[in-house]
Amino acid sequence: MENPAGDKPKIDDSAWIADSAVVMGNVKIEAEVLVAPNAVIRADEPGASIVIGKGCNIQDNVVLHGVEGSKVVISEGTSLAHGCIVHGPCQLGKRCFIGFGAVVFDSVLEDDVVVLHNATVQGVHLPASKSVPVGHTVLSERDVTGLPSVGQDLMDFKHRVSSVNLELVEGYRKMDTD
């Protein structure tokens, strides 16, 4: 959908977007991305942009929003789980996982960061391979100190979620052509 500023989403042909998802404004969706039902991806304010990297999955009821003049970057292989919110300005590294109902705002997350369910991350820089526990709030660099590293169990979980969703993209695209 075009926004009042005239920006139209650019969506790779290999991505799959559910009919009930909303994608509007200055949005770029790269190859093999899944955008599930009722997801909302909006970069419709002046100067806002959203880029979703190859192989990401944006699950049901996720909200991605870039406010005026902000950029949201979701890097390759990242999973945004059901009902989470990622609000610009924001940058997520490769292979991150944002859990159910989590909120990430005005932050930079390096590669392989896991933000578990119902956690809030705002105004911070999270180093690679850190994990934010369920329900935890991270609002300052002091809160970042002492966050655990992502263990093998969470690494395996992230990989399974990503793999399953890439298979869904293939399956849905095949159904669309049948």
Image (tube, rainbow, N blue to C red):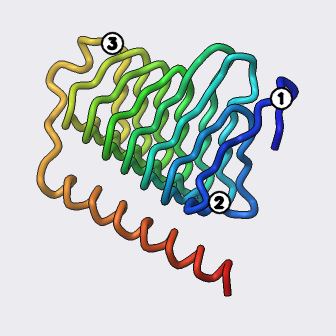
Tell me if residue 168 comes above or below residue 4 in the rendering: below
Mark 3 vs 2, N-terminal side: 2
Question: Residue 177: percent from the left, percent from the top?
Answer: 67, 81
168 up-or-down from 118: above or below:
below
Rendered location of residue 126, percent (x, y): 27, 24
Q: Position of residue 26 (x, y in %)?
A: 69, 32
Pick the quarter of the image with the N terminus: top right
Q: Residue furthest right?
A: 4
Q: Earlier in the sequence, mark 2 or mark 1?
A: 1
Give, as a three-letter code, the residue at label 1.
Gly
Q: Which residue is mark 2?
A: 17
Mark 3 lies on residue: 140
User: Which residue is rendered at x = 20% and y = 53% of the image?
Assistant: 155
Q: Amino acid at mark 3?
A: Ser
Mark 1 neighbour density, 10 Å: few (under 14) some (14–19) many (20 or more) = few
Q: Nearer the viewer, mark 3 or mark 1?
A: 1
Distance of label 3 from label 2 (alpha carbons): 35 Å
Which numbered disc, 2 or 1, marks the residue closer to the eye? 1
